[in-house]
Image (spheres, grey):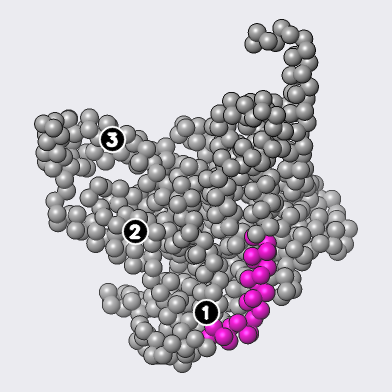
């Protein structure tokens, strides 16, 4: 008790910042937060403005009327629904495939001994350092040769394997007690059942973390879909927004309405899964691989 | 272990081992094939193609190191390299120091509303560079953009932002910083929380004040994390494409052209596949060297 008191005193004396400094620091953080949110506000605001109102100077901070017509117009002008469907399909299949391949490969690396394991692992490891931009030309040329450009195959299949995911799972599964697996074998579990019924359920945090990472990367990716799609029906949302920028360079309210629609899913997923996203970043410190 | 003397059990165990091995091969086969087809194969193809001239239509022509010689004398390529370094030099210091300061402040015990602040600062991270790009392009509009309007209050501007060769890249850097702060803040917060309380208590006994505490305890212990973040940001800077594509298309007058944009432009606008692969190979080696640094630091950290 006494010790605590002294600690508290020491704390106050040496580490307690004066109130005025605390207030100043709060002020800085709040200003920063406003800077973070302001572009979102401005996008939303613009998306509800009539084109004419946009040109008024000084700009209005609240629209004179909520002109939601921009949303209807952008929805009718470009196939936003189709873009969203493409993005959702591509992202969804990539996530499911990556989760399966990463978890199984990670499991194999973590808990099995087999000849060639180290070589195979080094192959996986070395690809971590290859930037996407370097491999896309050959991958594009292969797909072109096979006549698969502008298909879902081209959008999805090259990204079904996530080396980052394999490492994440290997790291996590290595931490699970091997006795658990041994015990299951004694109980007569087959290897597949061990993977499905013992390992996977324990991997829930990693599955969630990888899901949100993959969702963010693939929902937001522009580079590959831009290269591999050339018709309107195959475009993903990001390519759609990028093309909208060209077509409606002047029509900012419509562009902002389209952009607002495109970020709704990612904001929702972020708010639901933020615990796993933050935990995953803290764990790996890794960004898009 | 005693049982292993029993031959019957041993045979059973070895057959078990075999079925386990088979299972391991089975589940690693497809991922391995995909890695070979979509990662390892293409990297070798890239190296090979970089020795050819190929426009996709006519048959490729072998040039040996011709593409690299051309690359060496290509002003635009050098411009793209310099711009990439300029971009990195602009983004990295800001994206290391600002998140570090924020992490310091909101990690304090007296700071209330930490979760909310973390959420807000992270919002720009989750949206695509494409959407962030169009958001800011509109704010940067030289005539009716809100940036010039706001800056007028503190007596600055109006600026032409993305339309001006000298201002375009700094404008893009500004957007990159805005989008990157939240991410690094999370890494630093995790790093700060990894420092044991006892270190501070020891410092307290020695009578350190807040600034001495940061200077002599927190910063040295956080150094590996800071280095890690910086290297990661450098690698990220060399990969930047979306932001440039959406906001400037490399313009005005190549003022914002970066390596990946030039690679894309050569391959898919000029159809010089071999030449573009040459750019890719150069990029590969730059990132390889940076990654080796990164691995070293990662080892230090763990």
Locate the N terminus of chain A by quadrant: top left
Measured as percent of width and height from the top left, residue A155 is found at 72, 61
Using the image, name the chain to which the residue with label 3 belongs.
Answer: B
Is residue A130 in view from this perspective?
no
Q: Residues within 10 Å of mark 1 (few under 14, many from 20)?
A: many
Chain where mark 1 sits: A
Q: Secondary structure at mark 3?
A: helix
Can you give x and y, in whole percent of width and height, for residue B81 in the image? 57, 55
Q: Which of the numbered marks, if any, corresponds to residue B156?
A: none
Magenta segment:
A70-91
Check disc 1 and report its element: helix, strand or loop: helix
Instruction: Give the percent coordinates (x, y) of residue B3.
Output: 68, 10
In this view, the residue in front, B282 or A210, is A210
Please indicate whether residue B49 sits to the left or right of residue A128 in the image: right
Q: Which secondary structure type mostly characterizes the magenta part of the structure?
A: helix
Residue B197 tag number: 3
Query: Callout 3: few (<14), some (14-19), or many (20+) C-alpha neighbours within 10 Å?
Result: few
Residue A88 belongs to magenta span: yes
Does residue A149 show up? yes
Asked if labels 3 and 2 share a chain, the reply is yes
Q: CA separation, marks 2 and 1?
A: 26 Å
Element marked by disc 2? helix
Q: Which mark is residue A257?
A: 1
- Residue B212, placed above or below residue B143: above
Could you classify mark 2 by the number of other residues whose Cα lies within 10 Å: few (under 14), some (14-19), or many (20 or more)? some
Q: Which residue is mark 2?
A: B117
Q: Going from the N terminus, do you reach mark 3 or mark 2 first?
A: 2
Q: In the image shown, does B13 or A23 lie closer to the viewer?
A: B13
């Amino acid at each position: 008790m006494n010790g605590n008191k002294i600690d508290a005193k020491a704390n106050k004396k040496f580490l307690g910042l004066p109130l005025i400094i605390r207030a100043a620091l709060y002020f800085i953080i709040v200003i920063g937060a406003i800077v973070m949110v302001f572009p979102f506000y401005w996008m939303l605001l613009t998306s509800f403005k009539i084109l004419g109102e946009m040109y008024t100077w000084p700009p209005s901070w609240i629209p004179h009327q909520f002109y939601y017509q921009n949303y209807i117009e952008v929805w009718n002008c470009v196939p936003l629904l189709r873009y969203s469907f493409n993005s959702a399909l591509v992202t969804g299949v990539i996530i499911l495939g990556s989760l399966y391949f990463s978890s199984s490969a990670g499991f194999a690396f973590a808990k099995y001994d087999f000849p060639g394991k180290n070589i195979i692992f080094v192959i996986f490891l070395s690809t971590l350092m290859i930037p996407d931009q370097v491999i896309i030309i050959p991958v594009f040329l292969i797909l072109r040769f096979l006549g698969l450009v502008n298909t879902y195959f081209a959008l999805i299949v090259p990204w079904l394997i996530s080396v980052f995911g394999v490492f994440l799972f290997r790291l996590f599964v290595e931490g699970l007690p091997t006795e658990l697996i041994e015990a299951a074998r004694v109980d007569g579990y087959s290897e597949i059942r061990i993977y499905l019924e013992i390992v996977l359920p324990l991997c829930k945090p990693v599955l969630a973390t990888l899901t949100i990472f993959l969702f963010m990367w693939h929902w937001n990716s522009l580079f590959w879909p831009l290269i591999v799609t050339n018709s309107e029906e195959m475009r993903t949302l990001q390519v759609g927004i990028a093309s909208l920028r060209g077509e409606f360079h002047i029509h900012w309210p419509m562009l902002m309405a389209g952009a607002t629609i495109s970020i709704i899913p990612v904001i929702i997923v972020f708010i639901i899964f933020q615990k796993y996203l933050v935990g995953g970043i803290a764990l790996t410190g890794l960004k898009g691989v | 272990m005693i049982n292993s003397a029993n031959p019957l059990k041993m045979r059973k165990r070895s057959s078990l081992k075999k079925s386990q091995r088979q299972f391991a091969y089975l589940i690693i086969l497809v991922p391995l094939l995909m890695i070979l087809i979509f990662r390892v194969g293409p990297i070798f193809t890239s190296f090979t193609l970089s020795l050819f001239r190929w426009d996709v239509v006519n048959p490729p022509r072998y040039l040996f190191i011709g593409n690299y010689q051309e690359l060496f004398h290509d002003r635009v390529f050098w411009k793209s390299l310099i711009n990439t370094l300029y971009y990195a030099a602009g983004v990295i210091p800001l994206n290391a120091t600002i998140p570090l300061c924020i992490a310091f402040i909101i990690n304090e015990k007296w700071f209330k509303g930490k979760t909310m602040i973390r959420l807000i600062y992270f919002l720009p991270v989750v949206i695509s560079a494409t959407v962030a790009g169009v958001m800011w392009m509109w704010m940067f509009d030289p005539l009716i953009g809100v940036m010039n309007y706001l800056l007028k209050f503190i007596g600055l501007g109006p600026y032409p932002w993305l339309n001006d060769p000298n201002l375009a890249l700094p404008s893009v850097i500004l957007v990159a910083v805005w989008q990157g702060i939240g991410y690094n803040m999370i890494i630093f917060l995790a790093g700060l929380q990894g420092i044991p309380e006892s270190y501070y208590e020891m410092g307290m006994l020695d009578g350190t004040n807040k600034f001495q505490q940061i200077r002599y305890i927190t910063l040295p212990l956080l150094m590996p994390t800071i280095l890690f973040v910086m290297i990661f940001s450098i690698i990220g800077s060399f990969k930047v494409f979306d932001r440039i594509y959406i906001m400037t298309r490399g313009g005005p007058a190549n003022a914002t052209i970066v390596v990946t944009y030039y690679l894309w432009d050569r391959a898919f606008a000029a159809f010089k596949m071999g030449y573009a692969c040459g750019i890719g190979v150069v990029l590969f080696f730059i990132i390889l060297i940076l990654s080796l640094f990164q691995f070293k630091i990662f080892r230090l950290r763990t």
